[in-house]
Amino acid sequence: MKNNKLLKRMIKPSVVAISIASLSLSTLVQAKTKDIVHDAEFYVLKAQHGEKWQQEDKELQKKLAELKKKHGTTPNIIHIMWDDTPMGEVGFPAMQQLRGFETPEINKLAAEGINFTRMYTEASCTQSRAASLTGRHAVRTGLTQVGFPFEYGGLRDSEVTMAEVLGQAGYATAFFGKAHIGDIEESYMTNQGFDEANWTPYNQFPVLYGPQAEIAGAVLPTSTNPEIYPDDPYDMDKGWRTTGHIAVLEGKKGGPVREVVAPGDLPGWYENMEMQKTRTLNFIDKSVAAKKPFYVAYWPELIAFVPFPERKTLSGGLLQEGLVRLDPFIGQLKQHLKDKGIAENTLVVLMADNGPMTHNGPPGMVETMYRGGKGDYTEGGIRVPAMAYWPGVIEAGQVVGDIIHQTDLFTTFATIAGAEQYIPRDRIIDGIDQTSLLFNGNAHSRRDYVHVYTGEVYAATVKGRFKRHWVGELPGLSGASFYDLYNDPREVQPKMLPGFTTKGMFNTMKVRHELWIEEYPHSLEARGFSFTNIENARPETIKASQARFNKDEVPFDVEEVMKRSKDLGEFEANWGIK
């Protein structure tokens, strides 16, 4: 039994002192296999607040049943998530006056619902998107690196996505926008539970693979289009470059997948971005006509890494230019829901996927409020704008200070949809049910902690107002690594002696977290050749989806090379090498 093994380890002398220091791992053995398995820290809170939560849940279930009776279906869910935006950049008009742009529709939605001030995410795009889809920290699924051509990997089919959970509960599901969870067939969005999808397997970077971008200096000379240069007599390995990848894919569950935008096709990219808005509204219409509840993940690409031809902001920043182009659609979407008579039966969540790309990023990527950006474990990298809108259910005008994590949406959406029974029980689900926070408002979160990873590194821990940085400490010595986020929100005044009052508590949290990982080990990223079984694959795509050499042409093991490139201890893949 997993819990018995855990209990034996708990009584080891090295752990006893830590366990005595707080309500620690003894609570974990109370978890039943029929329940969702959460991170260890959740059970510490549940032991203290479980009875209260149980009473709240009874009332919430009554309200959800009343809503279903009133509207005829369980609630619809729309999740809109875009890139690289710092906390304060949207939803706060006063801040925008200082930044040279405005998003009146997004700001209005925030004012008409809940404006979250402590929404935490993973530190970068691929990790964040995997976490939202699975309700699990990205380190648990193996998607810890930001994917670029060729990734030769992606989300495993054994991971259970939000679309799969809701699909089993009778929801129509669709994905439009930036997925960024892999370029192998296993990770195609139509193989991850979505009924229909139009998605980017990478980020916006493939737009830069055209000759114009290379001539403008956006990428290294000859790295994408060597044919536009004179012949280089020293360029011996012509096949070394990543050619044949795809910018945007499209398909339906069980059907063929097609390429719809090729790398470097900037007009096609922008056209597809606008089409995704139309597809979102059309999918809503189809679902309403079929009298089916729906889940739409509209994760707009927002920009390309190429400036827009005209300016709509005084800022002129790439991010801000993208946000003001998204903004009118938010108003259009709200009106569309009202026209369809489903606004009061539809939860809409808007958020960014992580902080701004302040390190080597394009213009407009600035910290705004918190220190750091994309990839960082400081608040600026993982604390993002987020808001929820649900007329008649979510009280308007709320600014909420509770901690919420993007993985919480997974469990919350499932609860609202009556699909909680389809969440797997054989793995850790980091997402906590935050239905009470949506219905009851401020101070009703069921989390006061965040485990912060950058890649595979456990970098920091948040507990309420306090935070500890784990990276950079010397072995055997705790330095100035403790922060009070109320008095030092930008993490510029680290404390040593004043923070030692929290040292033992943070140590205990980390031990609980790590012991539970031993009971439920991390999964691995799926690996294989990219872009197999594309219906309209170009010749260069077909070539890229196969081994470059036969076995008798090279002496090395392709699988072993890829193992080491990803630093994986175990490995499974179908490389198709001849």
Image: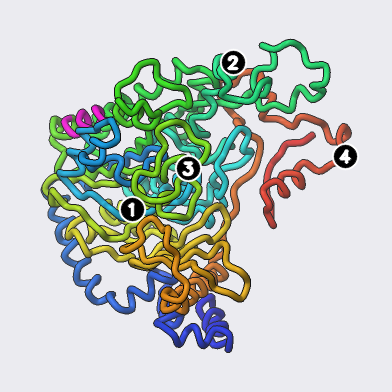
Mark toward the start of the polypeptide (3 vs 4): 3
Mark toward the start of the polypeptide (3 vs 1): 1
Q: Please give left or right for residue 258 compared with residue 396 in the image.
A: right
Residue range (magenta)? 327-335
- Camera-nearest label, 1 or 4: 1
Is 328 included in the stretch rendered in magenta?
A: yes
Q: CA distance from mark 2 to mark 3?
A: 27 Å
Q: Which residue matches tag 2?
A: 215
Q: CA distance from mark 4 to mark 2?
A: 38 Å
Asked whether residue 486 appears in the rendered view, the answer is yes
Q: Please give left or right for residue 180 compared with residue 163 in the image.
A: right
Q: Secondary structure at mark 1?
A: strand
Is 238 included in the stretch rendered in magenta?
A: no
Mark toward the start of the polypeptide (2 vs 3): 3
Other residues around mark 1 within 10 Å, as few (<14) / some (14–19) / many (≥20): many
Image quarter where the C terminus lies is top right
